[in-house]
Image (cartoon, rainbow, N blue to C red):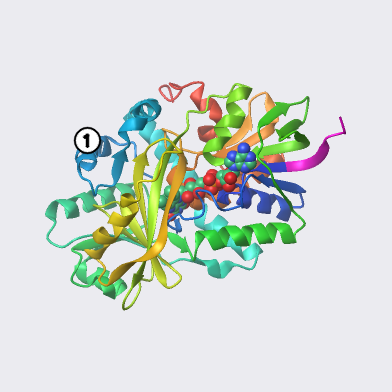
Amino acid sequence: MTQAKRSEIVVIGGGVVGLAAALTLQQRGRRVLLIDRDTPGAGCSWGNAAVIASSFVLPLSDVGHILAAPRMLLDPLGPLAIRGRDLMTTAPWLGRFALNALPSRQRRTIDALKLLNARAVTSWRSLLAGIGQSHAMAERGMLEVVRGGAVDHEASLRRLAARLGAEGIAVTWLDAKAVAELEPVLAGRVGAGILHRDVAHVSDPAIVSASLLNGFLSLGGKFLRAEIERLVPMESRVRLCFSGDEIVADRLIVAAGYRSRDMLTPLGCKVPIGVERGYHQMVEKTGPLIDRPISFHREAFLATPIGNQLRLAGTVELAAIDAPPAWKRAEQLVGLASRYLPGLAAVPGSRWMGARPSFPDGLPAIGSLEGIPQISYAFGHQHLGLTQAAVTADALCCLLAGRGAPFDLMPFSLGRFDRPFSHINR
Ligand SMILES: Cc1cc2nc3c(=O)[nH]c(=O)nc-3n(C[C@H](O)[C@H](O)[C@H](O)COP(=O)(O)OP(=O)(O)OC[C@H]3O[C@@H](n4cnc5c(N)ncnc54)[C@H](O)[C@@H]3O)c2cc1C
């Protein structure tokens, strides 16, 4: 057999998380090989809602959400669906998800999300500035609105604003007039809203991924299209096996989204990851667009300006990753958004489905393997992969440089699944 090719650092997975890591490491003078089985950025990172959602620190695993689940499931236009045929696959994840609504676990998740999200916008600012793409991010906040006359919806939004405020998140309560001053197109259609002041959004997630890749390549980074089948840890390195070939890496970062599980489970790691599938539908709009993302509080999805169109994105569908898409979940967003935004028309052929890689505790996995420190990992960023990509990249750079990360990485360790009750005495 010929001698395996050697690489200093290999990143597996060219989604926004792997791309941000590869670029940041290359910028800091490391020599990086990025590997993806597909075009970088074409996975879940391609069609997300484009929001750097730094205010999203309250986990979805919450007693309120769990109690509301039956109502949501019965509503064919509701934000949550569970595919009956895949229940055997999704039930264990759902059980763990429900357990994470326990107050002690929720507290742990909120504190950990705050560590990442507090740095999200600043990290993106410097990552984009480094490749001359500062214009790709707008810092105009995000509006979350309810319809006029819906008293219980408004009360629910008020409770959310109070909870976020108590967590130190910058939110401002707006009455209908103040909402309309910010986004005139909503005049007469909403009862109230909150402005998430520190939220930003990007011009187009697919273009941002392409810019990260171009920045990485222009600094001498290398890309290889290959599907990694197996990892073999060596004494101080790791062998990556793919279609009869192999590469030996001094350091490896596994950032392959949900599929990271297939590479790490054979090494003895517990990786209880699932997928929360979501959809988008692009729409054209007559008249003025909006200046910032709008989140529809009751309906639980977003409208984000992308170029001269709007992206309606969100919903959670618990199903097997390879189950056929339920396109009506994307199409129904047009009718729901039309209650707030006049003159919408679906752009033909522009619907999309993506599979969020999600752990039941709502936190990503970022760290290095215990006992195999040459293998690091960054995946499972669920609803917040775009938001947390740049800050995750910063943390990985510190880890690989042997320096302490700018914040405690323990809550993100995969080892947390070896000690599921470790939170109890904390
Ligand atoms: C509808 C929707 C809206 C969303 N909105 C937002 C939002 O507004 N803000 C936000 O922060 N997040 C949002 N998200 C979540 C976000 O998109 C994801 O968290 C993020 O894209 C995950 O990035 P990733 O790099 O981990 O995974 P991916 O983008 O899926 O990348 C993983 C890559 O690994 C590659 N790969 C897999 N296996 C292998 C292998 N064996 N060998 C080589 N390569 C491999 C794949 O080809 C892929 O390119 C949304 C998601 C959805 C579905």
| Image location (x, y in percent) of residue 409 | 56, 36
| Residue 27 placement (x, y as % from top left) | 71, 55
Taking the spot 47% from the left edge, 28% from the top edge, the residue there is 272
Q: From this viewpoint, is residue 16 visible?
A: yes
Is residue 388 highlighted in magenta?
A: no
Q: Residues within 10 Å of mark 1 (few under 14, many from 20)?
A: few
Amino acid type of the residue tagged 1 in the rendering: Leu
Residue 4 sits inside the magenta stretch? yes
Most extreme residue toward the bottom is: 287
What is the x, y in percent for residue 33?
Answer: 73, 47
Left or right: 216 with respect to 279? right
Q: Which residue is mark 1?
A: 67
Q: Nearer the viewer, residue 117 or 42?
A: 42
Is 213 situated above or below 109?
below
Q: Which span is picked out in magenta? A: 1-9
Place of residue 201 in the rendered image (x, y in percent of width and height, measured from the top left): 45, 62
At x 78%, y 42%, the residue is: 8
